[in-house]
Amino acid sequence: GESVGLHLPTLSVQEGDNSIINCAYSNSASDYFIWYKQESGKGPQFIIDIRSNMDKRQGQRVTVLLNKTVKHLSLQIAATQPGDSAVYFCAENTVTGANSKLTFGKGITLSVRP
Amino acid sequence: KAGVTQTPRYLIKTRGQQVTLSCSPISGHRSVSWYQQTPGQGLQFLFEYFSETQRNKGNFPGRFSGRQFSNSRSEMNVSTLELGDSALYLCASSLSPTSGNTDTQYFGPGTRLTVL
């Protein structure tokens, strides 16, 4: 069935290092993928998105890579800062007939060590 | 431009009661989606409204319902509350319906519902 999963529940990185958060998806018909960041007590915040016809997209300090061959999505954060500590979710736009909805992964906690 | 707002932020109810949560989307956004977030199940889609019509629905029982008003504000209702309904309920808005569209959804801070 459709599912979006994250490989690791937690990730701890040193401040200043690069972070890589990985996500696997199973629906090859998904046409749109999004990364969200959720800080404690807040709703998910949009980080970056990528359409299925792209392999890579860059934002400010973040890069999303999409590998459709192995159905893998990753979020790279350059020079990780303490403010990056949060739970990160990948989501895929799941198409069912004429309708679509976002399906979220379980979430991975990023912890930045000072 | 103000973000998505949700009221109330916190709510405590007892089993069997019903609850109504409110969401005001970003100005100009016409699509509102609702999600339930729990530690065990993560973020799960409840339903989406656009132009006062429910367009998509997740796999939740009929106790969960919603509606959207002409000004795009939305409410969701949960009747006959169960302990397992304790969760963070999130509302997200986008410019247009998610069907076949890649418009980004922007989330509100959520309503924390506790059922005792």
Image: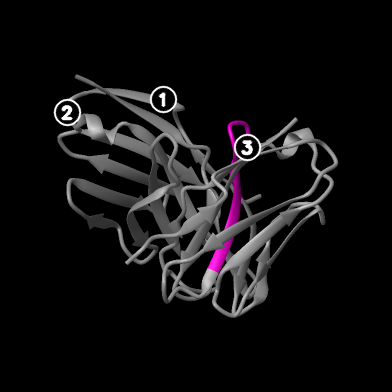
The CA span between labels 3 and 2 is 31 Å
- Which range of residues does the magenta coloring cover? B32-44
Crowding near pointer 2: few (<14 within 10 Å), some, many (20+)? some
The residue pinned by badge 1 equals A10
For marks 1 and 2, the one nearer the N-term is: 1
Q: Chain of mark 3?
A: B
The residue pinned by badge 2 equals A17
Tell me, yes or no, whether dots 3 and 1 are on the same chain: no
Q: Are marks 3 and 2 in contact (CB under 8 Å)?
A: no
Q: Position of residue A92 (x, y in %)?
A: 49, 55
The residue pinned by badge 3 equals B41
User: In which quadrant of the rendered image does the N terminus of chain B lie?
Assistant: bottom left
Main secondary structure along the magenta-highlighted residues: strand
Nearer to us of marks 3 and 2 is: 3
Answer left or right for A31 relative to B59: left
Q: What colour-coding does the image apply?
A: one colour
For this orientation, the residue located farthest to the top is A114
User: In which quadrant of the rendered image does the C terminus of chain B lie?
Assistant: top right
Amino acid type at mark 2: Asp
Q: Chain of mark 2?
A: A
Q: In the rendered view, would you say A29 is above or below A47?
A: below
Q: Position of residue B20 (x, y in %)?
A: 69, 54
Answer left or right for B52 relative to A36: right
Q: Regarding mark 1 in the picture, which secondary structure is present there?
A: strand
